[in-house]
Image (spheres, rainbow, N blue to C red):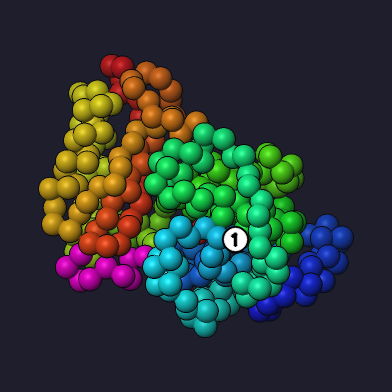
Amino acid sequence: MKVITTVEQLKQELAPLRLSGKSIGLVPTMGALHEGHISLVTRARRENDVVVVSDFVNPTQFNNPTDLATYPHTEEADRLKLEEAKADIMFLPSVEEMYPEPDTRVFNLGTVAEVMEGEKRPGHFNGVAQVVSKLFAMVEPTRAYFGEKDFQQIAVIRSMVELEGFKLEIVACPIVREADGLAKSSRNVRLTPDQRAIAPIIYRVLRASLEYAKSHSVAETTQWVADRINDFPFMDVEYYQIVNGDTLLPIESWEETNHIVGCVTAYCGDVRLIDNIAYCKPQNA
Ligand code: PAF
């Protein structure tokens, strides 16, 4: 595996491969790689001739300076994991390399970027669109891989791709979980042992809500999920919304769509965790 730190070298490396018709799979990451990321790399490896993994903590998508300052950097461990997963290129640029000039672009990403995380983290999705559009322009991938834990992010990236006219396939990959159900996240290492023991309650409640939803309305289910999670120590739900999985707008009744997703953001202590679950339309709805 090659570790490349400059855009010029990255382009030089990829141009002949692209010209000879090789497919290129890109896995954008912010490093601190865990099994969730590696599952994306493994899938990209299976589906492409060349696999590029970017490892870049993108400052423009952090609306909270403490979150940026405390974001884990584990480049050497990341490199070893990517070698093992048989990536071809690890792209490890500096902030100056990615942003030689401040990126002042403002993307009109539509309502998918305005609700939920868009509302709670102003500017976050614009920063994601900035860095991902730069990566797409540099790598010109055939396919790019993203985890469904960041369900809204995938919708936002699809919107950016349409806006910018990128020709590639966005591949959404299933959430990878710890044995106790907690969604794998680079933030999990910041949980204290006591918090780590409680955090799987998020997914346990989401799962239980699939049953609860069969005999309750969307509003009742929404409230029930937030209340059940908040029953536990350390837990504080920032929002739980049951949305149309295409528009990301909240639904009012189970009949509205077949694509129904419940999206949660909850603090466990001061660690902000997100997760989501798909609902089947209840039979009697
Ligand atoms: O999901 C992430 O890790 C980041 O938002 C991404 C897509 C790598 C952009 O920095």
Which quadrant would residue 5 be assigned to in this image? bottom right
Is most of the magenta stretch helix, strand or loop? helix
- Numbered range of the magenta stretch: 186-195
Give me the residue at 33% from left, 36% from top: 241
Q: Is mark 1 within 8 Å of ligand 1?
A: no
Please state the horizontal and vertical placement of residue 285, each as a whole percent of the image. Answer: 31, 17
Amino acid type assigned to the residue bearing label 1 in the image:
Val
**SS category of the residue bearing label 1:** strand
Give me the residue at 70% from left, 69% from top: 100
Is 78 magenta? The answer is no
Between 231 and 50, the one lying in front of the other is 231
Please state the horizontal and vertical placement of residue 227, each as a whole percent of the image. Answer: 17, 41
* Residue occupied by mark 1: 27
Q: Can you see residue 144? A: no
Give the total of numbered labels.
1
| Position above or below: 248 against 276 | above
Please state the horizontal and vertical placement of residue 78, each as a whole percent of the image. Answer: 51, 76
Dot 1, how many residues are within 10 Å of its Cα: few (below 14), some (14-19), or many (20+)? many
Q: Is residue 15 left or right of residue 120?
A: right
Give me the residue at 59% from left, 61% from top: 28
Which quadrant would residue 181 be assigned to in this image? bottom left
Q: Residue furthest bottom?
A: 76
